[in-house]
């Protein structure tokens, strides 16, 4: 029976791993069949004193503690581990040595040089300065932050990976809520169109058709003059024309620009009638007002929380009116 046990140990597959100490650039390649073997090799190769036991192995990427053999076997080859002795705490580092880490750093430089890399970092800095600006972000900015690797965003925001993961979940919820609002508006529009087909608002449609032809003639006559007055970017105009609920896709700055445009000039740029253009501008105005109200509410809650957290001795005593002697 002992011979069989030894044969099973020898035939167990070895997993190549990379080991290093905390805050160290030097890493070592080892192969181990289980966690205990990897710990022993870590002590020998990294010169960890046996008196500093127990040695804890964590993932170099995010500090996840690996203490289960089954989980260890599920990890890919060449997984990077950090060996923590005694009461050492894992700390994120983006300057590790080795060719694999150099390749990762060069990738980070390439990403920073690209437009996409600069964009998510700019949005992240805005979010770091004021967390309530989540409400003011466009759908594109929200998606950019959601797609960024958790470790990169944590480094930019100077937060832990767990905190940033929660933040990305919140961003996804905001994005989902806007998508739900868009879908609800689409369903409402489909319902209204069904009513139109049934003839419930046929008379209004006939009345507006005559006025619509007059408006189109006037719009066509002033096309060359008014089209130059529109200051919106092509990206905003495309969102207005193609999105079912464009006000949910635009940033607060873009919403302000849409509201300030003359309805007739904007109608020419979008090839719409003036009535439809005014309806979209009104929807943009309502969405902007809602976002500003939400920001004010968040700031009020923040100030209330700051007052509650201040020491009792610093709270101002309420003023009482003088009581006149009876």
Image (cartoon, rainbow, N blue to C red):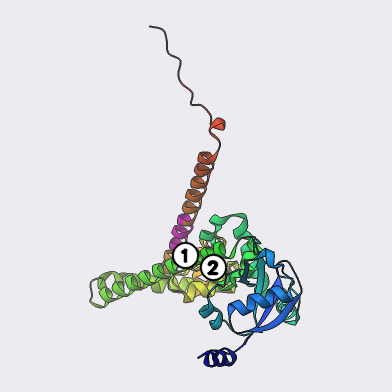
Residue wearing tag 2: 142
Q: Is residue 288 above or below residue 240?
A: above
Q: Position of residue 93 (x, y in %)?
A: 70, 68
Residue wearing tag 1: 174
1 and 2 marks in contact (CB < 8 Å): yes
Residue 124 within the magenta-colored segment of the rendering: no
Q: Position of residue 69 (x, y in %)?
A: 53, 78
| Mark 1 or 2, nearer chain start | 2
- The image shows a total of numbered marks equal to 2
In the picture, measured across the screen, residue 190 lies left or right of residue 244, that is left
Question: Observer-nearest residue: 3 or 146?
Answer: 3
Q: CA distance from mark 1 to mark 2?
A: 8 Å
**Residue 254 in view here:** no
**Residue 159 in view here:** yes
Range shown magenta? 282-290
The C terminus lies in quadrant: top left
Label 1 sits on a secondary structure element that is helix
Toward which corner of the image does residue 47 lie, by quadrant? bottom right
Which residue is pictured at 54% across the width and 68% down the height? 142
Question: Observer-nearest residue: 48 or 64?
Answer: 48
Question: Observer-nearest residue: 53 or 31?
Answer: 53
Q: Residues within 10 Å of mark 1 (few under 14, many from 20)?
A: some
Q: Residues within 10 Å of mark 2 (few under 14, many from 20)?
A: many
């Amino acid at each position: 029976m002992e011979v069989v046990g030894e044969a099973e140990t020898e035939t167990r597959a070895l997993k190549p791993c990379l080991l290093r100490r905390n805050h160290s650039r030097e890493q070592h390649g080892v192969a181990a069949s289980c966690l205990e073997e990897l710990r022993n090799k870590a002590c020998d190769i990294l010169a960890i004193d046996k008196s500093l036991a127990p040695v804890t192995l964590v993932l170099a990427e995010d500090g996840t503690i690996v203490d289960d053999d089954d989980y260890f076997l599920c990890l890919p080859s060449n997984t990077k581990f950090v060996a923590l002795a005694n009461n050492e705490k894992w700390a994120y580092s983006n300057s590790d040595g080795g060719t694999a880490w150099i390749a990762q750093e060069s990738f980070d430089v390439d990403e920073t040089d690209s437009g996409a890399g600069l964009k998510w970092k700019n949005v992240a800095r805005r979010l770091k300065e004021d967390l309530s600006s989540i409400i003011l972000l466009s759908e594109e900015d929200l998606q950019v932050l959601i797609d960024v690797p958790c470790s990169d965003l944590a480094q930019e925001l100077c937060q832990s990976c767990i905190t940033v993961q929660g933040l990305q979940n919140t961003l996804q919820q905001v994005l989902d809520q806007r998508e739900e609002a868009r879908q609800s508006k689409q369903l409402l529009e489909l319902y209204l169109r069904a009513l139109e087909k049934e003839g419930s608002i046929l008379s209004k449609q006939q009345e507006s058709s005559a006025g619509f032809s007059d408006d189109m003639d006037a719009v066509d006559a002033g096309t060359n003059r008014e089209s130059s007055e529109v200051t919106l970017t092509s990206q905003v105009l495309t969102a207005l024309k193609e999105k079912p609920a464009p006000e949910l896709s635009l940033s607060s700055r873009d919403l302000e620009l849409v509201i300030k445009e003359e309805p007739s000039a904007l109608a020419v740029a979008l090839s719409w009638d003036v009535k439809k253009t005014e309806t979209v501008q009104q929807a943009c105005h309502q969405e902007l007002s809602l976002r500003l109200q939400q920001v004010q509410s968040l700031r009020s809650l923040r100030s209330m929380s700051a007052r509650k957290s201040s020491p009792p001795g610093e709270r101002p005593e309420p003023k009482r009116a003088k009581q006149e002697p009876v």
